[in-house]
Image (cartoon, helix red, strand yellow):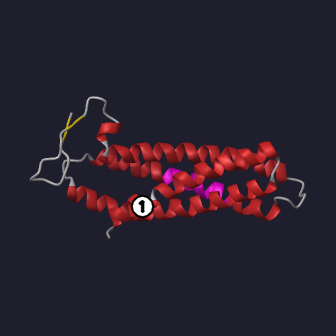
Amino acid sequence: MNDAFLHLIVNHLPVFSMLFGLLILIWGLIKSNTAFKKLAMVFFIVGAVGSYAAVETGEGAEDIIEDYVPSLSHDVIHNHEEAAEIAMWFSYVTGGLALLGLFITGKNIRYEKVLTGVLLVAALAAVGMLIYTAYEGGKIRHPEAHEPSAYIAPVNESYSTIEVYA
């Protein structure tokens, strides 16, 4: 198991944790359900931790993919890396607000509704940035999803890779 493999495993955690947390938070707000709001906050905290892990494993994955595919543009990797760092900070803010929210939600503290509203906005921004980061990451190894004219040749029996022709 190498850093590229670990990165592929870990990088989905922040995206889906934050997305599911956002959906659960919205449901909790609609239903005025404290348990759903707290569950969403746990998802946001997991997403923030997952963002850190994804960025850390991304450094090693970058070294591996640059050696594995020397023809790959460094700009594609750089764009993904820059988006990931910004998304990580959005995730940290959301996770921090969620951690604070876990302590005050359901305790009739004066600013609970304000914090929940700010958390909702932060989560929307984090999810948006994480999705953009995933889009940029997909450009690294999934040209078929980003180049409509890309043609994927069938796997040749003598090779274990897929050849892409644009």
- Regarding mark 1 in the picture, which secondary structure is present there? helix
Q: Position of residue 153 (x, y in %)?
A: 18, 39
Along the horizontal axis of the image, is 64 left or right of 26? left
Q: Nearer the viewer, residue 27 or 139?
A: 27
Q: Quadrant of residue 147?
A: top left
Q: Extreme top residue here?
A: 149
Residue at the image position 65 percent from the left and 48 percent from the top = 22
Residue at the image position 48 percent from the left and 54 percent from the top = 85
- Report if residue 105 lies within the magenta region: no
99, above or below 135, in the image: below
Residue at the image position 39 percent from the left and 58 percent from the top = 8
- Neighbor class of circle 1 (other Cα within 10 Å; few <14, some 14-19, many 20+) is few
Q: Nearer the viewer, residue 136 or 30?
A: 30
Location of the N terminus by quadrant is: bottom left
Q: Extreme front residue here?
A: 157
Q: Nearer the viewer, residue 38 or 127?
A: 38
Disc count in the image? 1
Residue matched to label 1 = 9
Q: Position of residue 17 (x, y in %)?
A: 57, 55
Along the horizontal axis of the image, is 24 left or right of 164? right
Q: Position of residue 154 (x, y in %)?
A: 18, 42
Q: Extreme bottom residue here?
A: 1
Location of the C terminus by quadrant is: top left
Q: Magenta region, mostly helix, strand or loop?
A: helix
Along the horizontal axis of the image, is 27 left or right of 154? right
- Report if residue 95 lies within the magenta region: yes
- Residue type of the residue flagged with mark 1: Ile
Residue at the image position 36 percent from the left and 49 percent from the top = 78
> What residue span does the magenta drawing correspond to?
85-97
Q: Position of residue 101 (x, y in %)?
A: 76, 59
